[in-house]
Amino acid sequence: MNSDFKIPITDDFLREAYSSNFYEFWDEHTLPILVETGTYLGSGVQNALFRGIKEIHSIEIDPQLYEMNLNFLFWGVKANRGGCRIDEKQSLFILGDDYNVNLYCGDSCEVLPALLTSGFDKRAFFWLDGHVSFPNGLASTKSKIGGNIPIFYELEAIANHHIKTHHIFIDMDNVVCWDNKDKIKKTILAINSEYKFKEVPRFYFDDPEKSSLAISRIKHLVGSETYSNGSGEDKCIEEHCKETTPDSYDKNTVLIAYIESNDS
């Protein structure tokens, strides 16, 4: 864990941090490069930076969410010193000495294959979370190629890459992924028969003991029992977390595919 990178502790950050237990499921199989589909509110990017991941590529299909994440990273440039190159479809942020975040606005079915054929020559861990979350508004834009859940197109792009030992994390909180779990595993095994699988919880709402541990971990990493959300008064981290509840459709499962012999 590396918390030298400065990030704003906001209501949304804490909600996403608790909802994913600070992405604890990344711990054993992270690699120096993150490739994410579905930037959403930026929680994956924020937590990767907090963990000291210094090269990040995140793809978001919704232009409004893309713009929201640009604003967060503008804050990062100011707080940590650095620079940026902004474009309507692709932006690069250099934060601090050697953190770099690449944001892409587009369909993962198109952007991911282009990224992986543009001289991308290092092992990475992939967080595949690029699905439609709501029928309307933010996070409701579907892929013209892959529809609401483009997981198999994303796996095809990874399969076509010359490196066959990437680690793959898949959010299973939708019916398509859940009902096609065996097909997803077979697709990954076709990339490399040495892949092993884990299914781990994304959050601990239904387990009081683990929920308390998750809250304790967040308070430890934030370094305080409270935080300021910009309103001028401190808020209690524990109270805020306990107000968070899971979505009714969520399967609370992350599928992890990893190559045991190449862990680093």
Image (cartoon, rainbow, N blue to C red):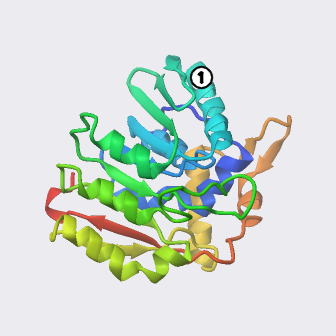
Q: Residue at x 67, y 37 (%)?
A: 68
Vertical comparison of 160 with 7: above or below: below
On the image, the x and y values in percent for residue 15 come to 68, 56
The quadrant in which residue 18 appears is bottom right
On the image, numbered disc 1 is attached to which residue? 79
Q: Residue at x 61, y 62 (%)?
A: 19
In this orientation, which residue lies closer to the viewer: 220 or 5?
A: 5
The quadrant in which residue 116 appears is top left
Q: Is residue 8 visible?
A: no
Q: Residue at x 34, y 47 (%)?
A: 113
The crowd level at tag 1 (other Cα within 10 Å; few <14, some 14-19, many 20+) is: some
Q: Is residue 118 left or right of residue 234?
A: left
Residue type highlighted by circle 1: Ala
Q: Is residue 3 left or right of residue 155?
A: right
In this orientation, which residue lies closer to the viewer: 87 or 13?
A: 87
On the image, the x and y values in percent for residue 188 come to 27, 68
On the image, the x and y values in percent for residue 81 come to 53, 17
Q: Residue at x 26, y 38 (%)?
A: 120
Q: Is residue 79 visible?
A: yes
Q: Is residue 65 left or right of residue 92?
A: right
The quadrant in which residue 8 appears is top right
In this orientation, which residue lies closer to the viewer: 235 or 75?
A: 75
Q: Secondary structure at mark 1?
A: helix
